[in-house]
Amino acid sequence: DTAVSQTPKYLVTQMGNDKSIKCEQNLGHDTMYWYKQDSKKFLKIMFSYNNKELIINETVPNRFSPKSPDKAHLNLHINSLELGDSAVYFCASSQYRYGYTFGSGTRLTVV
Amino acid sequence: SQQGEEDPQALSIQEGENATMNCSYKTSINNLQWYRQNSGRGLVHLILIRSNEREKHSGRLRVTLDTSKKSSSLLITASRAADTASYFCATDAGNYGQNFVFGPGTRLSVLP
């Protein structure tokens, strides 16, 4: 009954591969997000989706593409993975101006 | 960027002591939030304080907000070993409030 669940928890892959991370929330929140946390623990927003519309797209390479089939899901697809993509990726959801609920993270390692 | 920045970067205290962490930001906000992250886990929302509020309590947590100084503090009273975690402040960026910017966090260690 996890509120925000993302899979997989760990992902090890080679450079150049394409991978996806899935996220689902059962809170009925209107907005979902993807954040990237680097090795120094900095959290940087990548995308947010509100009612299936992308409302924020920070300076993220176009190799990253969010896909939201419905408001309970926001998946992250990454093409042509690079070493620098190694990080922990967090999915989160919120209901307008209230606190975020985060998933437990996906640790991506590109080798 | 109006990224919040926590201070100190790391804090080590004994169980039972109080822990104070500060957050400074650069531009006007609608609200500020504090989160906790245990090692290897996602962030957990602790408390939200709105720009028209000066102080808020939740259990052993006390958050203050000084909009004139663009700063906030998080006080954890009577700390426990289980409070060991990283603590982040997050500030919202605009009137839609959907883009929260996180600071680099304060790593708190509570020693038994």
Image (cartoon, rainbow, N blue to C red):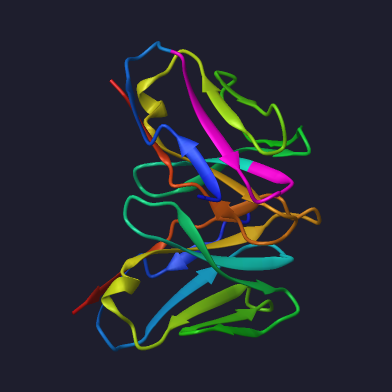
Q: Is residue B86 above or below residue A5?
A: below
Q: Residue A67's image quarter?
A: top right
Viewer-nearest residue: A30 or B112: A30
Q: Is residue A26 visible?
A: yes
Which residue is drawn at the image coordinates 51% and 42% (left, top)? A5
Which residue is drawn at the image coordinates 55% and 27% (left, top)? A76
Which residue is drawn at the image coordinates 42% and 18% (left, top)? A81
Q: Is residue A60 visible?
A: no
Q: Is residue B52 above or below residue A107?
A: below
Q: Quadrant of the C terminus of chain A?
A: top left
In the image, B96: left or right of A33?
Answer: right
Residue A1: x, y in percent? Answer: 52, 50
Q: Which segment is the magenta one?
A: A18-32
Viewer-nearest residue: A72 or A36: A72
Q: Is residue A59 magenta?
A: no
In the image, B39: left or right of A18?
Answer: left
> For the stretch drawn in magenta, what is the main secondary structure?
strand
Q: How many marks?
A: 0
Q: Is residue B18 above or below residue A52?
A: below
Residue A44: x, y in percent? Answer: 53, 44
Residue A91: x, y in percent? Answer: 54, 42
In the image, B41: left or right of A93?
Answer: left
Viewer-nearest residue: B40 or B26: B40
Q: Is residue A29 magenta?
A: yes
Residue A100: x, y in percent? Answer: 60, 56
Viewer-nearest residue: B64 or B110: B110
Which residue is drawn at the image coordinates 46% and 82% (left, top)? B75
**Going by the picture, which residue comes out furthest to the left?**
B112
In the image, B28: left or right of A8?
Answer: right
**Going by the picture, which residue comes out furthest to the right?**
B95
